[in-house]
Amino acid sequence: MTNPLLAPWTTPFEMPPFGGMSDEDFGPALEQGMEEGRAAYAAIAANPEPPSFDNTIEAMERADATLDRVAGVFYNLAGADSTPAREALQREMAPKLSAYSSEITNNKALFSRIETIWNQRDNLDLTEEQQRVLMLTRRGFVRAGAALEGAAAERLTEVKSRLATLGTQFAQNLLADERNWFMDLSEADMEGLPDFVKDTARAAGKERDRPGAVVTLNRSLIVPFLQFSPRRDLREKAYEAWTARGANGGETDNRDIATEILKLREERANLLGYDSFAAYKLEPEMAGTPEAVRDLLMKVWEPAKTAALADAEHLSRMATADGITGPLEPWDWRYYAEKRRVELHDLDETELKPFFQLDRMIEAQFACANRLFGLEFAPLDIEVYHPDVRAWEVTRDGKHLAVFLGDYFARSSKRSGAWCSAMRSQSALDGEVRPIVVNVCNFAKGDPALLSYDDARTLFHEFGHALHQMLSDVTYQSISGTSVARDFVELPSQLYEHWLEVPEVLAEFATHAETGEAMPEALRDRLLRAATYDMGFATVEYVASALVDLAFHDGPAPADPMQRQAEVLETIEMPRAIRMRHATPHFAHVFAGDGYSSGYYSYMWSEVMDADAFAAFEEKGDPFDAELARKLEESILSTGGSRDAAELYTAFRGRLPGVEALLKGRGLDDAA
C-alpha cells in the first residue's frame, strides 16, 4: 500500500493526512525523503552546465521537498504528542539525519559550484533576496565544515552525529522525568489552595489514573501550587523534584550527557578554526561576540540583583512572622511573593484568574491581529493530530494566508514549555505555498479553561511567533518566517505580548467566567500597575541561566558542568533564595539541540528591541496605529531572513535601541 505521507495530500489546504497515517509510516517516509534528497543533490553536483543561481542554489532549495514535508509533521508530533514508537524513531533518525546533512555539506563538487557562484556574484544580476540566500547558503556550508579536508572533515561528521544523538537523549530523559514524577495530595494537603488549583490537581490525578489529586511537574500546576500552598513541607518536596529534573540518577540523568555535549561542541568549534563554541555560534548573530552578550547581561544583572535582594528582605520578614526560623528558601519565594502582591497591589490571583478565560484570550489575540494587520480567523472542521487541537483558516481580504493550529493543554505525552513551529513553511519559488503554523502550550484544562496573567502573556508570545510565520512573504523557504538570527527571532513574539497590556484589549476580552462581566477598571488598573512586580526575581533567574550558558561555551569546555555552574553563580553572587530558571540537567534550550546554545541571552537581546519597538506605538499615542503596523509588517514580519536583522530593525525604527527601554519596561531603571 502507498505510504500516506508520500502520496499527494488531497486534504483541505493540503494538510497532513492525520487520519490515514500511523507511526509505522514515518520511518520509511523519512528514509524516502533522504533518498530523494541524495539523488537531487547528486544531480546538482554533477550538472555539466556551468554553475548558476538557478541550477544550483534554487535547485538546492527544492532538493529536500519530501524530507521537509515529512519531518515537519513528525517532529511536531514527537514534541507535542509523544509515543514510545515516536521516541524510538527519534533516537534512530537523529544520527541518520545528521549523517545525511554532513553528506551534503561534505560534497566537494557541490561546494565548488556554490563557491563559483559566490565569486561571480557581482556580475550575476541577482535580486537582493537572491544575494542573501546565496550568502547564507555558502556560509552554512562553510560553518558546517565544507572547506575541511581528510581526517578533520571525517571527525566533524562524527562529532555532529554524536551531538544529534545526545541532544535527542537529553530531551527524552527530561520528558521521562516530567512524565514519571507526581505527588499525591489528600484533601487535607489541599487546604488553603484556591479552587482553580484544586480543580487542576484533580484533573491531573485523573489523567495519571490516580484516585485523587496530584501535583505534577507541569508549570501550569506546580507554579500555582508553590504560590498558594501553606504547606511548606509539600512546597519543598514539589520544588526540589521540579528543579531536579534530569539529575535523579539512573537512565534519565542528563549530567554526563551535558558534559559530553560541551566537550564535543568545543571540538567542533576548534575543527572549524574558532577559539570557542561561543565565538563560533555568535558570529552570525546580531550580538556577534561573547563580549557583547556578557556586556548586555551584566548591564541588566546588577539592577536586577539589587531589586531582588530588596524584595528578599521583605519576604524574609514575612516568613519570620509565620514562624520560620531559618533563611528564606527557593520554595518559599513564590508563596510569600504572592502574599506580598496582595498587600502591595490588592491583587489576588484567585480574583484575577476568572477574567482570563483561554477562549476569550484566543479571541483577544485574533482581534489584535485583525486591527493591526487585517487578519481574519475562521474555525476549521478538519482532521488534526489530537482531540485537544483546534484549527483556524487565516485570511486577509478573502485571500488564504495560513492554517493555524492551537494545541493548548498539558498532557503527559507533551514536552514541557510552549513553542511555535511550522508543519509547512511559506515559500513562492514554484508558486505560492502558504504555511501551516502550530502554537503548543501546556495550560491546565478546565471548564472553562482559565489562565494566569503569565499564561495569557505566553499565549500572546507564541502567537507573535505565529504571525511571523503567517505573514511571511519571501520567495525561498530557507529564509521564510522565523528563519532569522537567533537573537532576532524573539522580537515579534515578545513585542506581541505588549498588546495584552493595552487597557482597551483587557476591557473587551478580560470577562468573568461566571458572570460575563468585564474586568472592573480598578482591578485592571491594579493589574497593570503591578506588571513589574517581582521583576527582580524573574530577571535574576533568567539572566543567571543566560550567564551560565555563556560561561559553558566561552572558553574550554568544563570538565564538570555542575561545578562550573556553581562557580558562575558564586561569582555573580546569586541571591540564595533564587535559583536559575533552568539548571544544567534540564536546560533543554541549550542541550536538547544547539538552537539556543550560547544563545539563551537572545530573549533579552530581543527584549531590548521589543521594548523600543512598542515605544514607537506609545509615541504615536495609538497601540493600533495603522501606519506603524504596516511598517512593522513590511520591515520585520513579512521579510523573514531576507535581510540582515539589524537592517530590518533599523528599517522599522530608524535606529538600533539601547538597554534603557528594557530596564524601564522591567521596572529596574530606579535600581540601575
Image (cartoon, grey):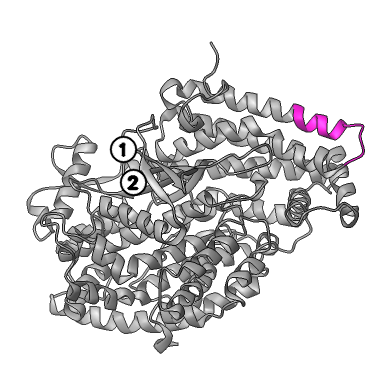
> Which of the labelled discs sits on residue 408, or is there none?
2
- Identify which residue is drawn at 40% across, 64% down: 497
Query: Which range is magenta?
Result: 39-51
> Looking at the picture, how far across and down is residue 201, in whole percent?
19, 48
Q: Which residue lies under the disc numbered 1?
A: 388
In this rendering, the answer to whether 486 lies above or below 292 is above
In this rendering, the answer to whether 130 lies above or below 318 is above
Query: In this rendering, would 244 be left or right of 262?
Result: left
Res 330 seen here: no
Packing grade of label 2 (10 A; few <14, some 14-19, many >=20) is: many
Task: Determine the residue located farthest toward the top in the rendered image.
Answer: 1
> Looking at the picture, how far across and down is residue 588, in whole percent?
48, 52
In this rendering, the answer to whether 39 lies above or below 176 is above
Res 91 seen here: yes
Identify the amino acid type marked 2.
Tyr
Query: In this rendering, would 146 be left or right of 29?
Result: right
Element at badge 1? loop
> Looking at the picture, how far across and down is residue 321, in whole percent?
14, 79
The alpha-carbon separation of the residues under discs 1 and 2 comes to 7 Å
Q: Is residue 22 magenta?
A: no
Packing grade of label 1 (10 A; few <14, some 14-19, many >=20) is: few
